[in-house]
């Protein structure tokens, strides 16, 4: 499936700041992206001044500002590319290839014989591990505005890593949903994994669909809990990418229907179909 | 203005700007006759980096390329290797995709119709684990009118049987090429592996076995290690290196093959812009292929065409084929 529109545009860095331990927020003026991006999709960015690292890097968009035609990306420094990104200055241009991938909005999750499309869910639980909170934010905003958001679980290594706390609180407060926090070190909320509050939520029968994004081990753990409670789950699978548009076959995810490309067949997947 | 990863000299950049929008509007004849077939220009795609072209058609009109060279096609579906299948390396990347493809039946059903209506010329890359498998693919494709030539993949390093296993010995090359020769009148392009001691010897074997042309280089066998996990970056441990890092090796091999055989050559290996492509032509290539660069900038292939045209116009070259082998070695 070829997702339109496809374009390359010059993004201009409008702001760039550190927001947590090895965590940065980057705002880019990118009109085509800002106007066409749907939650859960990604863009493929060429980082300038990095001539010996030639591949683009994929990023989801955390928030958009349609009035300013700006997009905000959150990133964590994990390797050479992201280390170099920290040197990006306001006013610099980056080449943005966009917009790729299936949106959360088109997600369909199943469990056993039941199937539920995101648009039909009425009680949604959002679970974010670490920076998985970034690609989930715009979805959560949409769910809240439709009155179908029931629970949010945000997990991170430490309190300092919960950089999206305020943004999510605002959404949750506006629609009367509940929010739960977990940290690995117990510095805030429940100590432990996101699966702890999720268990309670599922036991109480509070939702009809869970959506989750985070490190793969976290999503796998969430899937196990959801499967135990016969709960459909949508996940966002991040894989190493070269082309980002479906031709190179680097980013494959094994599923019960064969190998799927996370860049065009995903990144949103029915967790029950992923071979974990 | 775009800023290419590798900056050609300022003159080349300035000149390519004048022709960049509309290839074919200059006085340069960009056509090449390759294996008796006319191509509208000398630029094609490197197998595995472009699929059949549908995804790239959103960025460039694929029918403006000299040819599309497809992903490798095997007789039955191949699922390829375990992930991680890629790793970035200095000025390049490793891949161990493993020739994942849906098989020739699915290719004929889904890719051929698209190619027929969108590609000016079609070169199908043929893959197999055994000689018989190469022949199965060729036999199945013989009835497809839009297929102009076959590129025999005897050089992929990411499969245990077939691929590079054939292309690293004279005997292996001879077996595949001579068997394929008996099965088709279509032009046969032998895609050679650089993982050999003497590329000229391999090219001579392909020529003697009946190949009509040589394409090179396929990827160089390489490896990357993660010091944090102390594991290889690729699940398969080793993979094929491509990108700017391989260009000097590729150029040298094109030059050596051009000296050794009379067959026309498709040159590839790290071409990121028109200037790189021209180097390959000067070294002896009649056509060039753009591969990894497609991932960096989807418009690269089109820019290479425009840039070659601009160079020829600037240099007073009326036919692009004059560039082939025009290297001055005094």
Image (cartoon, rainbow, N blue to C red):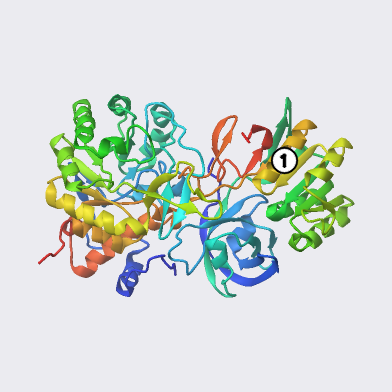
Tell me: residue A76, above or below residue B260: below
Tell me: residue B74, above or below residue A107: above
Q: Which residue is mark 1?
A: A221
* Residue B227 % position (x, y): 52, 55
* Residue B58 % position (x, y): 47, 50
Q: Is residue A26 left or right of residue B9?
A: right
Residue B243 occupies quadrant: bottom left
Tell me: residue B279, above or below residue B134: below
Residue at the far front: name it: B230
Instruction: Tell me the residue at 18%/64% (across/down).
Output: B317
Q: Give the camera-side residue of A168 and B131.
A: B131
Q: Is residue B315 left or right of residue B99?
A: left
Instruction: Tell me the residue at 45%/35% (across/down).
Output: B80
Q: Give the camera-side residue of A212 and A265.
A: A212
Residue at the far left: name it: B330
Q: Is residue B111 left or right of residue A70?
A: left
* Residue B223 % position (x, y): 41, 50
Secondary-structure class at tag 1: helix
Q: In this rendering, does residue B259 appear at all?
A: yes
Q: Give the camera-side residue of A141 and B249.
A: B249
Chain of the residue that carries numbered disc 1 in the rendered image: A
Tell me: residue B272, above or below residue B261: below
Q: How many marks?
A: 1
Residue B120 occupies quadrant: top left
Query: Which quarter of the rendering shows the N terminus of chain B?
Result: bottom left
């Amino acid at each position: 499936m070829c997702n339109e529109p496809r374009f390359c545009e010059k993004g201009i860095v409008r702001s760039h700041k550190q927001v947590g331990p090895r965590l940065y927020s980057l705002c880019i003026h990118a009109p085509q992206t800002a106007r066409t991006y749907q939650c859960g999709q990604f863009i493929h960015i060429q980082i300038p001044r990095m001539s010996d690292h030639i591949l683009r890097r994929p990023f989801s968009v955390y928030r958009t500002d349609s009035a300013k035609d700006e997009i905000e990306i959150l990133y964590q420094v994990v390797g050479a590319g992201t280390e170099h990104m920290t040197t990006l200055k306001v006013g610099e241009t980056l080449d943005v290839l966009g917009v790729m991938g299936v949106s959360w909005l088109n997600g369909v999750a199943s469990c056993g014989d039941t199937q539920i499309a995101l648009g039909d869910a009425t009680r949604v639980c959002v679970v974010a591990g670490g920076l998985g909170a970034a690609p989930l934010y715009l979805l959560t905003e949409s769910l809240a505005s439709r009155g179908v958001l029931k629970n949010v679980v945000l997990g991170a290594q430490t309190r300092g890593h919960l950089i999206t706390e305020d943004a999510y609180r605002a959404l949750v407060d506006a629609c009367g949903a509940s929010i739960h926090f977990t940290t690995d070190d117990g510095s805030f909320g429940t100590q432990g994994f996101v699966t702890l509050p999720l268990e309670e939520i599922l036991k109480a029968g509070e939702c009809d669909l869970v959506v989750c994004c985070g490190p793969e081990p976290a999503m796998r753990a969430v899937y196990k809990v959801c499967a135990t409670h016969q709960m459909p789950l949508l996940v966002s699978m991040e894989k190493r990418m070269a082309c980002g548009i479906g031709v190179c076959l680097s980013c494959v995810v094994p599923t019960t229907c064969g190998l799927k490309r996370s860049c065009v067949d995903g990144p949103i997947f029915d967790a029950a179909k992923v071979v974990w | 203005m775009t800023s290419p990863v590798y900056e050609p000299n300022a003159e080349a950049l300035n000149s390519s700007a004048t022709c960049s929008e509309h290839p074919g509007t200059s006085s340069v004849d960009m056509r090449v006759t390759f294996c008796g077939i006319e191509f509208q220009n000398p630029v094609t795609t490197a197998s595995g980096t472009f699929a059949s072209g549908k995804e790239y058609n959103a960025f460039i009109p694929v029918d403006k390329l000299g040819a599309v060279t497809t992903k490798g096609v095997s007789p039955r579906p191949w699922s390829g290797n375990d992930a991680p299948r890629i790793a970035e390396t200095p000025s390049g990347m490793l891949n161990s995709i493993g020739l994942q493809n849906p098989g020739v039946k699915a290719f004929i059903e889904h890719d051929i119709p698209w190619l027929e209506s969108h590609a000016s010329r079609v070169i199908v890359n043929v893959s197999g684990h055994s000689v018989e498998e190469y022949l199965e693919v060729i036999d199945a494709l013989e009835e497809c009118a839009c297929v102009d030539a076959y590129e025999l993949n005897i050089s992929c390093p990411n499969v245990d049987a077939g691929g590079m296993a054939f292309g690293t010995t004279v005997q292996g090359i001879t077996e595949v090429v001579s068997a394929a020769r008996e099965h088709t009148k279509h032009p046969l392009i032998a895609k050679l592996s650089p993982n050999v001691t003497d590329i000229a010897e391999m090219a001579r074997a392909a020529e003697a076995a009946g190949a009509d042309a040589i394409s090179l280089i396929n990827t160089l066998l390489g490896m990357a290690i993660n010091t944090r996990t102390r594991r290889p970056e690729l699940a398969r441990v080793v993979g094929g290196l491509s990108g700017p890092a391989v260009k000097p090796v590729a150029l040298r091999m094109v030059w050596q093959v051009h000296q050794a055989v009379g067959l026309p050559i498709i040159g590839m290996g790290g071409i990121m812009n028109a200037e790189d492509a021209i180097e390959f032509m000067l070294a002896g290539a009649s056509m060039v292929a753009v591969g990894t660069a497609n991932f960096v900038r989807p418009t690269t292939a089109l820019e290479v065409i425009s840039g070659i045209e601009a160079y020829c116009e600037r240099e007073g070259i009326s036919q692009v084929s004059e560039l082939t082998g025009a290297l001055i070695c005094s």
